[in-house]
Image: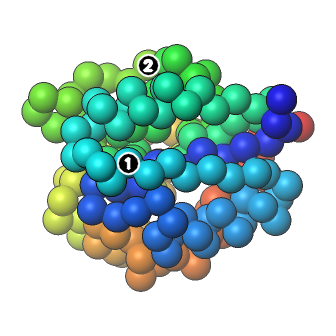
């Protein structure tokens, strides 16, 4: 079994190795984690993406699911089945009509980053999730992509991984 793994889930309009994922993958590798980032671009159906992740069954002694936008939804919804040790969400597309179920099995180590100026996913959804699951919450002066704050996100992610149980 892999010792430490971060499994990324990209957003609806991005790909598996976009700028944010590449940067965070470098951070993960520097902390001794292997990384994987499945390609979900063949479908815009969030539940089909969850099913794809569950079929992959990523496993590790220390498993982190990390997702951005729709990938945040995918990662959060997979927690009940995959039982990750950490969940890292960026502008998670939660609580949209038709895919608004409350995620279950959220690990105690959970972090949410959201932009105050997000025009795609209202910031209130991040607040709702963070409050319900007692997650760390970082609200940044940023838009939905959070790309303008990638250095800050990398620092937050590095701190998050440092807090993973050994």
Element carrying mark 1: loop
Q: Is residue 8 left or right of residue 49?
A: right
Pick whichever, 30 or 46, lies toward us.
46
The answer to whether residue 153 of the structure is visible from this angle is no
Residue at the extreme right: 166
Query: From the viewer's perspective, is residue 80 above or below residue 96?
Result: above
Position of residue 118 measured from the top left corner of the image (x, y, whole percent) = 24, 65
The answer to whether residue 15 of the structure is visible from this angle is yes
Residue identified by numbered label 1: 40
Q: Is residue 119 left or right of residue 28?
A: left
Position of residue 134 measured from the top left corner of the image (x, y, whole percent) = 50, 33
Pick whichever, 107 or 71, lies toward us.
71
Position of residue 3 measured from the top left corner of the image (x, y, whole percent) = 85, 37
On residue 104, the disc is: 2
Q: Is residue 144 left or right of residue 15?
A: left
Position of residue 155 measured from the top left corner of the image (x, y, whole percent) = 65, 69
On residue 25, the disc is: none
Q: How many marks?
A: 2
């Amino acid at each position: 079994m892999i010792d430490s793994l971060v499994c990324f889930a990209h957003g609806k309009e991005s790909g598996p190795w976009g700028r944010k994922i590449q940067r965070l993958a470098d951070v993960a590798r520097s902390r001794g984690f292997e990384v994987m980032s499945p390609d979900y671009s063949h479908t815009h159906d969030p539940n089909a993406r969850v099913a794809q992740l569950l079929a992959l069954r990523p496993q590790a002694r220390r498993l982190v699911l990390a997702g951005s936008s729709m990938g945040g939804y995918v990662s959060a919804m997979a927690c009940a089945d995959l039982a990750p040790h950490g969940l890292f969400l960026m502008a998670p597309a939660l609580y949209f009509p038709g895919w608004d179920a409350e995620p279950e099995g959220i690990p105690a180590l959970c972090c949410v980053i959201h932009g105050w100026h997000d025009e795609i996913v209202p910031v209130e959804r991040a607040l709702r999730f963070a409050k319900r699951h007692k997650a760390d919450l970082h609200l940044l002066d940023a838009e939905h992509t959070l790309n303008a704050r990638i250095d800050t996100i990398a620092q937050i992610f590095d701190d998050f991984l440092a807090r993973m149980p050994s």
